[in-house]
Protein backbone atom coordinates (compact mmCIF):
# COMPACT_ATOMS: atom_id res chain seq x y z
CA UNK A 1 0.00 0.00 0.00
CA UNK A 2 2.99 2.28 0.37
CA UNK A 3 3.41 2.23 -3.41
CA UNK A 4 -0.22 3.18 -3.98
CA UNK A 5 -0.01 6.03 -1.46
CA UNK A 6 3.22 7.20 -3.11
CA UNK A 7 1.56 7.28 -6.55
CA UNK A 8 -1.44 9.20 -5.19
CA UNK A 9 0.92 11.70 -3.53
CA UNK A 10 2.85 12.24 -6.78
CA UNK A 11 -0.38 12.69 -8.75
CA UNK A 12 -1.61 15.20 -6.17
CA UNK A 13 1.66 17.18 -6.31
CA UNK A 14 1.64 17.28 -10.12
CA UNK A 15 -1.97 18.45 -10.28
CA UNK A 16 -1.21 21.16 -7.71
CA UNK A 17 1.76 22.37 -9.78
CA UNK A 18 -0.60 22.89 -12.71
CA UNK A 19 -3.18 24.67 -10.57
CA UNK A 20 -5.59 21.75 -10.42
CA UNK A 21 -7.01 19.81 -7.48
CA UNK A 22 -8.15 16.21 -7.07
CA UNK A 23 -11.75 15.99 -5.89
CA UNK A 24 -11.88 13.89 -2.71
CA UNK A 25 -15.64 13.39 -3.17
CA UNK A 26 -15.26 12.01 -6.71
CA UNK A 27 -12.09 9.97 -6.18
CA UNK A 28 -12.49 6.34 -5.14
CA UNK A 29 -10.07 3.45 -4.84
CA UNK A 30 -10.50 -0.26 -5.32
CA UNK A 31 -8.08 -2.83 -3.92
CA UNK A 32 -8.06 -5.88 -6.17
CA UNK A 33 -7.48 -9.21 -4.52
CA UNK A 34 -4.56 -11.06 -6.09
CA UNK A 35 -3.02 -14.45 -5.56
CA UNK A 36 0.69 -14.46 -5.09
CA UNK A 37 2.55 -17.68 -4.31
CA UNK A 38 -0.75 -19.35 -3.44
CA UNK A 39 -1.69 -16.74 -0.83
CA UNK A 40 -4.43 -14.15 -1.11
CA UNK A 41 -2.76 -10.88 -0.13
CA UNK A 42 -6.03 -9.16 0.65
CA UNK A 43 -7.52 -11.92 2.80
CA UNK A 44 -8.05 -12.37 6.53
CA UNK A 45 -4.38 -11.68 7.25
CA UNK A 46 -4.79 -8.15 5.88
CA UNK A 47 -7.80 -6.99 7.89
CA UNK A 48 -6.12 -3.80 9.06
CA UNK A 49 -6.22 -1.74 5.91
CA UNK A 50 -4.09 1.33 5.61
CA UNK A 51 -6.26 4.13 4.22
CA UNK A 52 -5.13 5.90 1.06
CA UNK A 53 -5.29 9.65 1.63
CA UNK A 54 -5.03 12.94 -0.21
CA UNK A 55 -4.07 15.91 1.94
CA UNK A 56 -4.95 13.92 5.06
CA UNK A 57 -8.44 12.95 3.85
CA UNK A 58 -9.23 9.25 3.35
CA UNK A 59 -10.37 8.17 -0.10
CA UNK A 60 -13.54 6.08 -0.32
CA UNK A 61 -12.90 2.39 -0.99
CA UNK A 62 -15.32 0.57 -3.30
CA UNK A 63 -15.87 -3.10 -4.19
CA UNK A 64 -16.97 -2.60 -7.83
CA UNK A 65 -17.46 0.05 -10.47
CA UNK A 66 -18.62 0.44 -14.06
CA UNK A 67 -16.07 1.31 -16.71
CA UNK A 68 -16.91 1.62 -20.40
CA UNK A 69 -20.09 -0.40 -19.93
CA UNK A 70 -18.44 -3.25 -18.03
CA UNK A 71 -18.48 -3.96 -14.31
CA UNK A 72 -15.12 -4.40 -12.59
CA UNK A 73 -14.88 -5.81 -9.06
CA UNK A 74 -12.27 -6.29 -6.35
CA UNK A 75 -12.36 -10.08 -6.73
CA UNK A 76 -10.79 -9.79 -10.21
CA UNK A 77 -13.47 -12.14 -11.57
CA UNK A 78 -16.04 -11.79 -14.31
CA UNK A 79 -18.92 -13.44 -12.39
CA UNK A 80 -20.99 -10.28 -11.89
CA UNK A 81 -20.27 -9.11 -15.45
CA UNK A 82 -21.42 -12.44 -16.92
CA UNK A 83 -24.59 -12.34 -14.80
CA UNK A 84 -25.40 -8.81 -15.99
CA UNK A 85 -24.79 -9.71 -19.63
CA UNK A 86 -27.00 -12.81 -19.36
CA UNK A 87 -29.81 -10.66 -17.94
CA UNK A 88 -29.42 -8.14 -20.76
CA UNK A 89 -29.41 -10.91 -23.36
CA UNK A 90 -32.59 -12.40 -21.86
CA UNK A 91 -34.31 -9.03 -21.94
CA UNK A 92 -33.28 -8.44 -25.57
CA UNK A 93 -34.44 -11.91 -26.60
CA UNK A 94 -37.83 -11.57 -24.92
CA UNK A 95 -38.31 -8.18 -26.57
CA UNK A 96 -38.06 -9.73 -30.06
CA UNK A 97 -39.36 -13.24 -29.32
CA UNK A 98 -42.96 -12.81 -30.54
CA UNK A 99 -42.25 -10.25 -33.26
CA UNK A 100 -39.24 -11.94 -34.83
CA UNK A 101 -38.21 -15.34 -33.51
CA UNK A 102 -41.69 -16.88 -33.19
CA UNK A 103 -43.16 -15.22 -36.29
CA UNK A 104 -43.58 -17.86 -39.01
CA UNK A 105 -43.95 -15.19 -41.72
CA UNK A 106 -40.42 -13.85 -41.32
Image: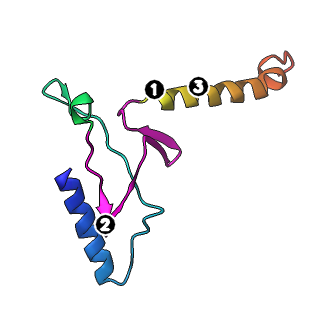
Q: How crowded is the residue under tag 1: few (<14 C-alpha within 10 Å), some, or many (20+)?
A: few
Q: Which residue is mark 1?
A: 79
Task: Name the residue rendered at 47%, 63% in the picture.
Answer: 25
Secondary structure of the residue carrying tag 3 is: helix
Residue 59 higher or lower than 103, as above or below: below
Q: Position of residue 17 (x, y in %)?
A: 28, 83
Residue 104 higher or lower than 18, as above or below: above
Task: Name the residue rendered at 23%, 55% in the picture.
Answer: 4
State how the image is colored. Answer: rainbow
Label disc, if present, on residue 56 of the rendered structure: 2
- Give the extent of the magenta segment: 48-77
- Mark nearer the N terminus (3 vs 2): 2
Q: Is residue 6 left or right of residue 60?
A: left
In magenta segment, residue 65: yes
Task: Name the residue rendered at 67%, 24% in the picture.
Answer: 90
Label disc, if present, on residue 51 of the rendered structure: none
Of 59 and 101, which appears nearest the observer?
Answer: 59
Q: Position of residue 26 (x, y in %)?
A: 47, 62
Q: Which mark's residue is nearer the viewer, 3 or 2?
A: 2
Quarter-wise, where is residue 32 in the image? top left
Q: Is residue 82 left or right of residue 96?
A: left
Of 16 and 46, which appears nearest the observer?
Answer: 46
Q: How crowded is the residue under tag 3: few (<14 C-alpha within 10 Å), some, or many (20+)?
A: few
Q: Which residue is mark 3?
A: 86
Q: Which mark's residue is nearer the viewer, 3 or 1?
A: 1
Quarter-wise, where is residue 44 in the image? top left
- Mark nearer the N terminus (3 vs 1): 1
Cα–Cα gap, marks 3 and 2: 42 Å
Specify the quadrant that holds the C terminus: top right
Cα–Cα gap, marks 3 and 1: 11 Å
Q: Is residue 28 left or right of residue 5?
A: right
Amino acid sequence: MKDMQFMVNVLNKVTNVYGQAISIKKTEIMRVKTEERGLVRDGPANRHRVPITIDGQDLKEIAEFKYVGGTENNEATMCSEVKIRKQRMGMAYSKYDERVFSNKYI
